[in-house]
Amino acid sequence: MKERFIVIGGDAAGMSAASKARRENSKLEIIVLEKGGWASYAACGLPYYLKGNVKNIEDLIAIQPEIFRKERNIDLRLNHEVTRINPEKKIIVAQSPQGEIELTYHKLLISTGAKAVKPKIKGIDSHGVFFLRDIASAIKIKEYLAERAPKSVLIVGGGYIGLEMAEAFYSLGMSVQIVELLPHLLNSFGLEIAEVVEKYIKNYVRLHLGRRVNKIREIDTGKLSVYVSTEQDKQQEDIDTEMLLLATGIVPEVILAREAGIKLGPSGAIVTDEFGETNMPDIYAVGDCAEVTSIVTNQNTYIPLALTANRNGRAVGSTIGGKKTHLSPVAGTAVVKVFQLEVATTGLMDIEVAQKYGFNPIKNTIDSRSRAGYFPGSKPIKISLMADRNTKKLLGCSMVGEEGVAKRIDIVATALYSKLTAEQLENLDLAYAPPFSPVWDPVLTAAKVLNGKLEGKH
Amino acid sequence: MKERFIVIGGDAAGMSAASKARRENSKLEIIVLEKGGWASYAACGLPYYLKGNVKNIEDLIAIQPEIFRKERNIDLRLNHEVTRINPEKKIIVAQSPQGEIELTYHKLLISTGAKAVKPKIKGIDSHGVFFLRDIASAIKIKEYLAERAPKSVLIVGGGYIGLEMAEAFYSLGMSVQIVELLPHLLNSFGLEIAEVVEKYIKNYVRLHLGRRVNKIREIDTGKLSVYVSTEQDKQQEDIDTEMLLLATGIVPEVILAREAGIKLGPSGAIVTDEFGETNMPDIYAVGDCAEVTSIVTNQNTYIPLALTANRNGRAVGSTIGGKKTHLSPVAGTAVVKVFQLEVATTGLMDIEVAQKYGFNPIKNTIDSRSRAGYFPGSKPIKISLMADRNTKKLLGCSMVGEEGVAKRIDIVATALYSKLTAEQLENLDLAYAPPFSPVWDPVLTAAKVLNGKLEGKH
């Protein structure tokens, strides 16, 4: 009998693993079980599908199922939901369109991803309340928009998805409000950056910061009344809206893993070793359901990101295919487009979190510009940079601006990987031409000022 | 008597040194002698002044002379040309508007910059032939454009200045031709990138590659006939033009240094130690007249760049002010805007040069895109990446595209500083969102493919 490799979950991590395992090993039998009707799609593109930038949902499919089956000899089975893992017998049980099936495995990968947090709110199942997590949920929203043409939406959650969807709804001509429980949008980017985003987005969106949604009521067909207040139930307000989107974050999908006795970390995600193997022999986990190693702290943490899912999926596929490959540590680099603003972060930007990890953090924020001062069209860029006072090493960076931010953050992401100090960052030889940067790139200026503070000059 | 620090040359390097020395040391007497009528201006902005993006030449002055004099207590003297250095007596002689003066110094900085190469061409001093090197030369061109409104221009030289000026002249409605002696534009970027630039620029400019200018004749007022041929005097052509711009590169301005017995390197630029001090005690050199250390080869080399002049000027100022500061090594990162194209490079991209330095280079070129494939407005990006087969370490990178190139090169510049291998570059956690990048950033894809080749897979 051939060695059999079973993958649970056919998204970025799972399909990357299956494909790489096939490239490394032509003899392996590879079966992917995906509970939904789609595999290998770009979840990050969903807001742009709803906005209309991406015309067809099929455009988000990176690789068609037939390609996996015919060209890569991967037995991809859609609408197959795994219901149980038996690690002792090395068997999984799945619900298929033809009924329950059992399959034995030699190697198993859990790449079940994450699911949207469903907050406990009275009336959350009302008509007109949506999540955005996968293609099925995006199609539901698209249909509602087409049928009802709602004129207003309340978004609950001021993170990436909330902000991207605010832009999408606004561009469709809708009146948009955002409720965020924390005092700031994009809380993990740090106060200074968040405030720029808030000031900017108020031109388009009404914000309710430090507010929670307590109750949702259907007051009429296609009309909701949403009761919003502070945590202490003060400053109550009833907001009328024709639609509500819950974007309150994601949690790892680990039910199968937990029931099989697989170890979870404090984050709730699956713990693995440096090759992605869990505490159960021959069972691996990777992608949005698993923890990763932080490049900054060297500790396990939960940072679900598309690139990590793809890359670490590939690494596990390589290992299972016969070539042992380390997972990559993660800086947590992210960028989000908020209307015309680019907002980006990498590493650790929360002083209290940094202190918990034993760092002695110092943070500084500077203002610079995207082009030479005399060059027309130059836009402001604000950069927060954080380092450790003891080692002088960089811990993280956030930045915001209308131009030149999205890829500028990668300078610091690369510096974090290389364990550079603020002084070393200051000494980088970065590209300069008047249309693209001041002579001293904003990142160099941020490093120079922070380094001055580290040297005790200011 | 106070310690006296004399700076020869009041541009980026000199004024940075003077300013930093002042900040470190309030007691020093600081005199800057600048032969021209301008100090501290942004030479890189001159093409954009001529194009009209920058309205007033004064906008290119980073800091006004009065600021240096009044706020920084720096004795900046314009129109003072130093004619001789006497290192034994520690005296310099200068021609001032009031006649010859002599000044003693304790510390001396030579920051005389570079000058335009003046090729030996018959008729080079004809009316209508220009260089672009400094404010004075830019004003001459501006005046000629205003008085004559020439309809055509021939640019000699296909480097940064030549290409930036091609865009400037084209945007003024002129017919533009470029003659380049080498077989390609932007030769140091590598063939693959140069070819993209050439194909693109042909939409705007007539190119004469592998051609030299042999003779320039004034055939009438404001009319030139330029005799162009191959090196072997084949494929001759007489080109009529109303204006000719020589942009055939720059060479370090080292006459003073050479006459004073200061050591020059094989590049012709001044050799210094790691603090910028020349072979003559208490005489420093920095900026476009001096060599720098390459981050890739660890050898002295000549890479004149604005950021280096500013930063190493600052380092020498710090050392002279009393705080010894190392010069920074240079990756040679550069970006140039060619109409709507962004073309960037860092490190070493010439295989033969790399071999001379003892490397065993391997180069690979990939095609990727500036945004997720399904996201509208995505533009092609081409990346050439080079590494050393023996150490697997990166040597250099060039890239070209209409979007997302200018600052993306800084990822590799940072990687070169950090001595990363191709595999480490592949493992960077870079920013991803559909409007700004594919999940696998083009740099990661370039690294992945090159790394595959290094592992002998392809």
Image (spheres, coloured by chain):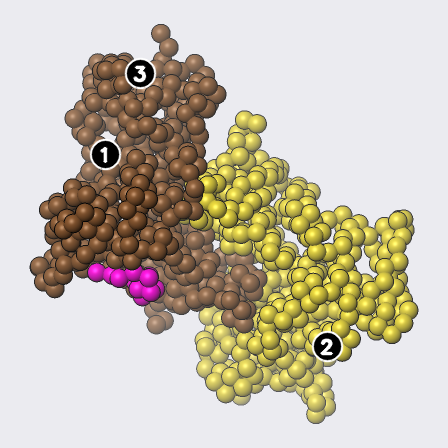
Chain colours: A brown, B yellow
Mark 2 vs mark 3, CA separation in Å: 79 Å
The amino acid type, in three-letter code, at marker 3 is His
**Mark 2 lies on residue:** B146
**Mark 1 lies on residue:** A253
The amino acid type, in three-letter code, at marker 1 is Glu
Look at 22% across and 15% down and name the residue there. A100
Give the class, few, some or many, for how many residues have Cα within 10 Å of label 3's Cα (few <14, many ≥20).
some
The amino acid type, in three-letter code, at marker 2 is Ala
Looking at the picture, tell me which residue is in the foreground, B67 or A7. A7
In the rendered structure, which segment of residues is drawn in magenta?
A196-208
Looking at the picture, tell me which residue is in the foreground, B252 or A17. A17
On the rendered image, what quadrant is the C terminus of chain A found in?
Answer: bottom left
Which numbered circle lies on residue A300? none
Question: Same chain, marks 2 and 1?
Answer: no
Which numbered circle lies on residue A106? 3
Is there any visible trace of residue A264 in the rendered image? yes
Whether residue B44 is situated above or below residue A173 in the rendered picture: below
Question: Same chain, marks 1 and 3?
Answer: yes
Q: Label 3: chain?
A: A
Q: Label 2: chain?
A: B
Mark 1 vs mark 3, CA separation in Å: 23 Å
Mark 2 vs mark 1, CA separation in Å: 69 Å
